């Protein structure tokens, strides 16, 4: 074989070709290594941009959490008049300082426009503190507490003449209204709006940075393929190993890309590095797609299935001829909770209901939030003879909601239940809804099983 090669090479100037190929190969190798390093830099920048975005959002949440904590303490003081909440309030202001630390950490490290939103949120939070401390002064005065027992900031608040002239009950009512009324919540919404704008701007900047890095990385990969192809052509005779180290790996890579799967790590160092970089990006894209799919199928507040996923599930269960039960659930008088305690407390109640549904029902049961305060559960492989199991679960859930230990207001559930012996049917939802209507008509806070016959059938449980 060596003699045959020599005879073939004798037809050309081997030294000239060898030197030319060596020179071009060195240039191509240097260019390939440079592109690989550049790809690594672009990849690191891609990861760094994601990490920075997470850090920025964490700082924004610190500002939000700090502001929310101050709101929580002043509202607790307004509702309970216990001075320890004032102490906790000023511990956050003077010692913990989550808001200030987060803003100081980002100062000079992020786009000025984005930072201005966070700074505005901080300024609005500080302005809101004046209202909160005025409320504290009103409540403290109305309760007759010695001002010397309270922080100097509260002592220094000057009440207006008209407020000083109020009787204790009116003064206490005014103090509470200042931190529990709609005006206060509007100012809180302004803070949250600026924090959301900050997060939105950082996501936008991160997306621009990632798109540029991804574009550069794609260009680098295309150049690498070109360099490798030229090396294959130039060194087809001298570098026989190129077939094993470059060409075959490239063929595998192309097939993997067409099959939409990760690249097999093989071949030369450069190609291995390329495959690892591609695979890391592939894993990141898979994770992002999984996150988007989860967000599309789950309610963002409670984390359980949303209405769209619930409707798709109903269609799937129509084809499965298995027994199941459908529970339609309403939170009783939820509007009163929102009106009396605020939407944030209402959101916490909805989260609590969703969590209890997940805890008390089986893993194979399927809870969903299908409306504002409306939930549903599809319990699979369950028959009417097992209704006692559902009764016990619902009683435990209602007992937990009616006797809260977490500071949330007591609530209850009204539940309508219907069974199917052969999968989901078009009439099943209507039956469960009719049973729910009977529960509401009879005073709420309970459950009812749909029974064929008159609505007042004594066999229907309530």
Image (cartoon, grey):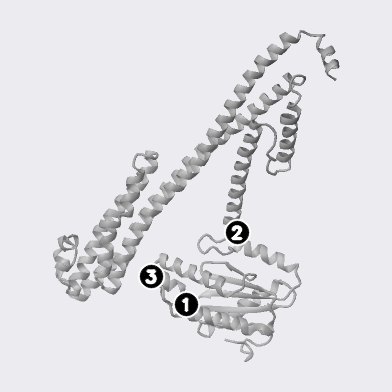
Alpha carbons under labels 3 and 2: distance apart:
29 Å
Residue 304, how many percent across, how many down? 56, 64
* 220, above or below 325, in the image: above
Give the left or right position of residue 117, taking residue 252 as reference: left
N-terminal of the pair, mark 3 or mark 2, is 2
| Residue under label 3 | 341
Residue 165, how many percent across, how many down? 14, 70
**Quarter of the figure with residue 381:** bottom right
Of residue 462 and residue 92, the one placed in the foreground of this image is 92
- Residue 401's tag is 1
Alpha carbons under labels 3 and 1: distance apart:
16 Å
- Residue 89's tag is none
* Residue 181 visible in the picture: no
Label 1 sits on a secondary structure element that is helix
Q: Residue at x 57, y 32 (%)?
A: 39
Contact (Cβ within 8 Å) of mark 3 with mark 1: no
Alpha carbons under labels 2 and 1: distance apart:
27 Å
Mark whose residue sits in front, 3 or 2? 2
| Residue under label 2 | 297
Residue 427, how many percent across, how many down? 69, 74
Counting the numbered discs, the total is 3
Label 2 sits on a secondary structure element that is helix
* Residue 346 visible in the picture: yes
Mark whose residue sits in front, 3 or 1? 1
Of residue 43 and residue 14, the one placed in the foreground of this image is 14
Give the left or right position of residue 441, taking residue 449 as reference: left
């Amino acid at each position: 074989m060596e003699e045959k090669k020599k005879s073939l090479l004798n037809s050309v100037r081997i030294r000239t070709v060898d030197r030319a190929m060596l020179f071009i190969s060195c240039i191509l190798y240097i260019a390939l290594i440079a592109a690989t390093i550049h790809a690594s830099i672009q990849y690191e920048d891609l990861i760094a941009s994601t990490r920075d975005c997470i850090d920025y959002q964490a700082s924004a949440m610190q500002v939000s959490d700090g502001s929310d904590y101050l709101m929580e303490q002043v509202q607790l003081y307004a509702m309970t008049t216990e001075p320890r909440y004032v102490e906790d309030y000023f511990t956050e202001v003077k010692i913990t300082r989550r808001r200030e630390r987060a803003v100081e950490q980002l100062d000079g490290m992020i786009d000025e426009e984005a930072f201005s939103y966070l700074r505005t949120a901080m300024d609005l939070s500080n302005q809101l503190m004046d209202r909160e401390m005025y409320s504290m002064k009103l409540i403290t005065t109305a309760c007759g507490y010695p001002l010397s027992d309270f922080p100097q900031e509260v002592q220094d608040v000057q009440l207006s003449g008209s407020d000083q002239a109020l009787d204790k009950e009116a003064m206490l009512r005014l103090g509470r209204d200042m931190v529990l009324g709609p005006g206060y919540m509007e100012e809180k919404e302004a803070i949250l709006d600026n924090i959301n704008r900050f997060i939105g701007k950082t996501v936008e900047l991160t997306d621009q940075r990632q798109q540029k890095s991804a574009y550069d990385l794609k260009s680098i990969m295309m150049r690498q393929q070109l360099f490798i192809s030229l090396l294959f052509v130039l060194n087809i005779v001298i570098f026989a190993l190129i077939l094993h180290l470059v060409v075959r790996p490239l063929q595998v890579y192309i097939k993997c890309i067409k099959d939409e799967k990760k690249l097999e790590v093989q071949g030369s160092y450069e190609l291995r590095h390329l495959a690892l970089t591609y695979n890391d990006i592939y894993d990141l894209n898979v994770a992002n797609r999984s996150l988007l799919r989860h967000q599309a199928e789950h309610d963002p507040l409670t984390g359980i299935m949303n209405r769209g996923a619930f409707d798709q599930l109903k269609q799937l269960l129509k084809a499965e001829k298995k027994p199941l039960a459908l529970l339609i659930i309403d939170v009783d008088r939820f509007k009163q909770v929102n009106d009396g305690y605020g939407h944030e407390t209402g959101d916490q109640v909805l989260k609590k209901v969703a969590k209890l549904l997940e805890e008390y029902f089986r893993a194979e049961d399927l809870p969903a939030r299908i409306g504002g305060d409306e939930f549903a559960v599809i319990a699979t492989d369950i028959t009417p003879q097992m209704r006692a199991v559902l009764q016990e679960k619902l009683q435990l859930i209602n007992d937990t909601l009616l006797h809260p230990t977490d500071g949330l207001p007591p609530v209850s559930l009204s539940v309508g239940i219907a069974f199917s012996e052969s999968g989901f049917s078009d009439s099943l939802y209507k039956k469960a809804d009719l049973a729910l209507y009977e529960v509401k008509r009879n005073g709420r806070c309970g459950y009812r099983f749909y029974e064929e016959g008159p609505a007042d059938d004594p066999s229907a449980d309530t």
